[in-house]
Image: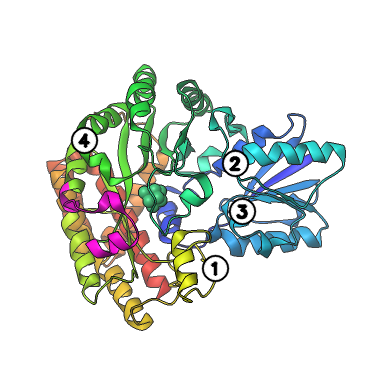
Amino acid sequence: MNVLLIYPEYPDTFWSFKHALKFVSQKASFPPLGLITLATMLPERWDKKLLDLNVKKLREKDIIPADLIFISAMSVQSSSVKEIISLCKRLDKKIVAGGPLFTSSPENYQMVDYLVLNEAEITLPLFIKDFYSGDLKHIYSSTDFADIKTTPIPQWNLVEMAQYTSMNLQYSRGCPFDCDFCDITVLYGRKPRTKNREQVLAELDALFNAGWRGPVFFVDDNFIGNKPKLKTEILPAITEWMKAKKYPFYLNTEASINLADDAMLMDMMIEAGFESVFIGIESPNEKSLAECNKVQNQNRNMIESIKKIQLSGLEVQGGFIVGFDNDHQNIFEDLTNFIQKSNIVTAMVGLLNAPRGTKLEERLLSEGRMLKDFTGNNTDFSINFIPKMDYDKLLSGYKSILNTIYSPKYYYERTLNFIKTFSPKQKKVFHFNPNYTSALIKSIIKLGIIGEERFYYWKLFLWTLFRKPKLFSLAILFSIYGFHFRKISNDVY
Ligand code: SF4
């Protein structure tokens, strides 16, 4: 049995980092962790190949030898999914599809032969059993959540690691919070489910033994969803492993803002090798936070909390949203000022949307304000419901935020302010990668000679080189990210 696992292409978004990837001559940020984990769950004797369309083109000759095509996708990949399905249908291939896109809207994918929905740990074995008994059904779904202590190690030998900037690993699924626009809790529940110590170490070993050195992203919805387990079991084990292997990985993850309230947890994360965390900050407007039930962000001085995390030695990347019912006319200026004051360099601002199955969608449906499915693309300016604020005003305010925060003046000012105050506690073990040298040279040419940002680029370059040389590579990385953010926001206007 020849199986082809296809990962659809991402459009150009802030998250794709496509324009930044060109500096390091790599094609994508992360390999498709879900598909390579699913590969291990398939019968061992099946022959498996991976085709990541973010790395390679979709070609007939790759599809023709396959007996079964597996596709996994998120909402943002829907346009590439359509192309894959139509080519596979033309070549008369059987398709098996799963992942968040198909789980949240299976009715849009009736042409797919087998929809293996929800969590693969539960539904894939049912599909395989029926496959062998010759009694296959169109849909496999479940309302149960999987015990991820049984999830196997991803099949890393399917991945061409040199094409990616970072590898990834999942320790937990689900989040204890209940933000009304978030589909994580719909898909994975509010009780964080975790892997055990041995599994996490085995996954780190697998990456190490596959030859990887460099960034590893813990893709957890909220890494600190179960703090006691992290402190007593997982972080001490990761620390011991990282020390024994001489810190081969640079770790990063996603967490909620209450991380700021736990100095011990931050210290333990840093000792384990974590360098940055992505946090959903959403809004400086208390009423909007209350509206979306972002309880963990309410009644706290958010700037202070962010600074606490930064001062502990972790870089904070932030997610922000505009378009809440309670957003007033000044929200665009307030949010811009907030981002600038926070020194969050990687600030991702999106328009509010209501994904399938969320409480937000339920409320908007009851108010007769839902319009269409959520695209998952944070740069297509779509809103899938009727906002309270006039749409044109909302859009022009949103564009003014992007124009300002990514403009060379604001972006580099934030970056320099961050670098000036940032002191990582852990000494970084540098793993040489020839791509980093070429990225430096390309940044000098593209940003320091040709680019509109050249004055700001050199200011950051020289200041960091002479005053904080240990953060020089981070400064160059931020400069490259800035180029990507500007390019994406300019391209979409
Ligand atoms: S904290 Fe993040 S993952 Fe958790 S419910 Fe809120 S938005 Fe979703």
Q: Which residue is mark 3?
A: 103
Asked if the beta carbon under badge 2 is closer than 8 A to the nearest atom of ligand 1, the reply is no
Circle 4 SS class? loop
Q: Which residues make up the magenta segment?
A: 285-304
Marks 4 & 1, CB-CB < 8 Å contact: no
The residue depicted at 29 percent of the width and 76 percent of the height is 397
Quick one: label 1 or label 2, which is nearer the N terminus?
2
Dot 4 surroundings within 10 Å: few (below 14), some, or many (20 or more)? some
Is residue 68 left or right of 143 when viewed as pictured?
right
Quick one: label 4 or label 1, which is nearer the N terminus?
1
Amino acid bearing label 2: Asp
Is residue 115 left or right of 323 when viewed as pictured?
right
Residue 79, given in percent of the width and then of the height, sits at 60, 65
Distance CA(mark 4)–CA(mark 3)? 41 Å
Quick one: label 4 or label 3, which is nearer the N terminus?
3
Q: Residue 486 occupies which quadrant of the picture?
A: bottom left
The residue depicted at 26 percent of the width and 31 percent of the height is 265
Nearest to the eye among marks 2 and 3: give it: 2
Q: Identify whether 200 is placed above or below 77.
A: above
Nearest to the eye among marks 1 and 2: give it: 2
Nearest to the eye among marks 2 and 4: give it: 2
Q: Which mark is residue 424?
A: 4
Q: Which mark is residue 144?
A: 2
Q: Is residue 292 magenta?
A: yes
Q: Residue furthest right?
A: 134
Magenta portion: prevailing SS class: helix
Residue 35, given in percent of the width and then of the height, sits at 61, 42
Asked if the beta carbon under badge 1 is closer than 8 A to the nearest atom of ligand 1, the reply is no
Q: Which mark is residue 373?
A: 1
Marks 2 & 4, CB-CB < 8 Å contact: no
